[in-house]
Image: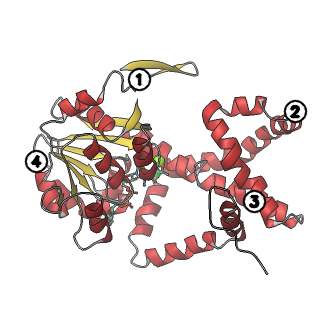
Amino acid sequence: MAKLNFGGVEENVVTREEFPLAKAQQVLKNEVVAVIGYGVQGPGQALNQKDNGINVIVGQRKNSKTWDKAVKDGFVPGETLFEIEEALQRGTIICYLLSDAAQIQLWPTVKKHLTAGKALYFSHGFGITFNEQTGIVPPKDVDVFLVAPKGSGTSLRRMFLQGRGLNSSYAIFQDATGKAKERVVALGIAVGSGYLFETDFKKEVYSDLTGERGTLMGAIQGIFAAQYQVLRSKGHTPSEAFNETVEELTQSLMPLVAENGMDWMYANCSTTAQRGALDWWKKFRDATLPVFNDLYESVATGKESQRSIDSNSQVDYREKLEAELKELRESEMWQAGKTVRSLRPENQKPAEVVA
Ligand SMILES: NC(=O)c1ccc[n+]([C@@H]2O[C@H](COP(=O)([O-])OP(=O)(O)OC[C@H]3O[C@@H](n4cnc5c(N)ncnc54)[C@H](O)[C@@H]3O)[C@@H](O)[C@H]2O)c1
Ligand SMILES: CC(C)(O)[C@@H](O)C(=O)O
Ligand SMILES: [Mg+2]
Ligand SMILES: [Mg+2]
């Protein structure tokens, strides 16, 4: 375990140098890793483990699209692909990668197969932290831990195929066998993590729920929408408003920020942009700070988790969700974005020409 300095604060980080893949393979050599669920994280984690030489099987409902996807991805029915209950029975490490809401439904079945010495693995602190809402309380004689990739399962797989690694958090909730640490770190490496950052279940889920509702998705969509609306209301064309709100950010500036940080970006733009961005960032911080405080409070009091559980358990939720997604998809801003994206030279299809 390396102690690294993050802006003056020391933290524990597991690196691939100190815990190489060969060590992970050694730790997991007698385990059967059962990945339950083949949605977004399931394929990324299962395929990376398979390619890393881990004995991995997938548990998924038969006659579903995702069962067919698993077959297409190379999992073989009866050998490495099973109905959920059979995979649960075969697995010594259960990677519980159903949606957070579905985990509640299937929990009684999972619990039945958690015999002494097995391990229960999550990619989120949700089920355990909010156990009063989820009812997920594991037996005492199994290891319980998480590896939470800090990004989409799609990126986890893509980055693995590019020879890169996505950063993940890891945490141990219960160490029944005395081997939880080596098991969880080995799994973290096997699923394709770059670095593994130590946390606990509660911190992981609080930060994850805040991040996705905040700057990763909710807040940024809100800020995009507000700026776009102002530019449009002042007579700017959709393409100009979109380019100045989203396209330049994702295509030009964010890749540079990803490489070098926003401090570098500030030092490497025009003096005009620099002056203005220095003057305005604190106003945006101060305007949004109360919203972020409300958001964190809503996460910490369990309001967000309850809302997610309640919504996902409604029978007509899929239709309602689709209506909300359609509104976003059909908004002028994202329709303008579709055309702007099609104009990128690397996107062959020509933009729709209006007669
Ligand atoms: N989506 C991500 O990229 C991401 C990133 C980090 C962590 N996570 C966490 O990973 C876990 C899995 O998330 P996901 O987004 O991959 O899940 P998902 O929503 O894609 O669903 C996963 C699987 O659950 C199955 N499923 C849904 N309802 C079911 C039911 N009632 N019975 C049986 N199977 C059912 C689906 O068929 C699918 O195969 C969650 O804890 C999530 O918070 C997800
Ligand atoms: C990919 C995200 C947003 O980081 C994840 O947390 C999720 O829930 O899908
Ligand atoms: Mg999340
Ligand atoms: Mg996340």
Residue 152: give x, y in percent of width and height: 46, 50
**Rendering colour mode:** secondary structure
Residue, far bottom: 355
Q: What amino acid does circle 4 point to? A: Thr
- SS under mark 1: strand
Q: Nearer the viewer, residue 260 or 346?
A: 346
Question: Which residue is pictured at 79% across the width and 66% down the height?
Answer: 238
Q: What amino acid does circle 1 point to? A: Asn
Say which label, 3 or 4, has the lower sequence index: 4
Q: What amino acid does circle 2 point to? A: Thr
Q: Which residue is mark 1?
A: 12
Q: Which residue is mark 2?
A: 271
Q: Nearer the viewer, mark 3 or mark 4?
A: 3
Say which label, 2 or 4, has the lower sequence index: 4
Say which label, 3 or 2, has the lower sequence index: 3
Q: Which residue is mark 4?
A: 115
Query: Label 3, label 4: how many angstroms apart (C-alpha)?
Result: 55 Å
Q: How many marks?
A: 4
Q: What amino acid does circle 3 point to? A: Phe
Q: Which residue is mark 3?
A: 242
Q: Nearer the viewer, mark 3 or mark 1?
A: 3
Mark 3 touching mark 4, by CB under 8 A? no
Query: Label 2, label 4: how many angstroms apart (C-alpha)?
Result: 64 Å
Say which label, 1 or 4, has the lower sequence index: 1
Question: Which residue is pictured at 51% across the width and 74% down the height?
Answer: 322
Whether disc 1's CB lies below 8 Å from ligand 4 is answered no
Q: Nearer the viewer, residue 244 or 224?
A: 244
Whether disc 2's CB lies below 8 Å from ligand 2 is answered no
Query: Label 3, label 2: how many angstroms apart (C-alpha)?
Result: 23 Å
Query: How many C-alpha atoms fall within 10 Å of the one at disc 4: few (<14), some, or many (≥20)?
Result: few
Query: Label 1, label 2: how many angstroms apart (C-alpha)?
Result: 39 Å
Mark 1 touching mark 2, by CB under 8 A? no
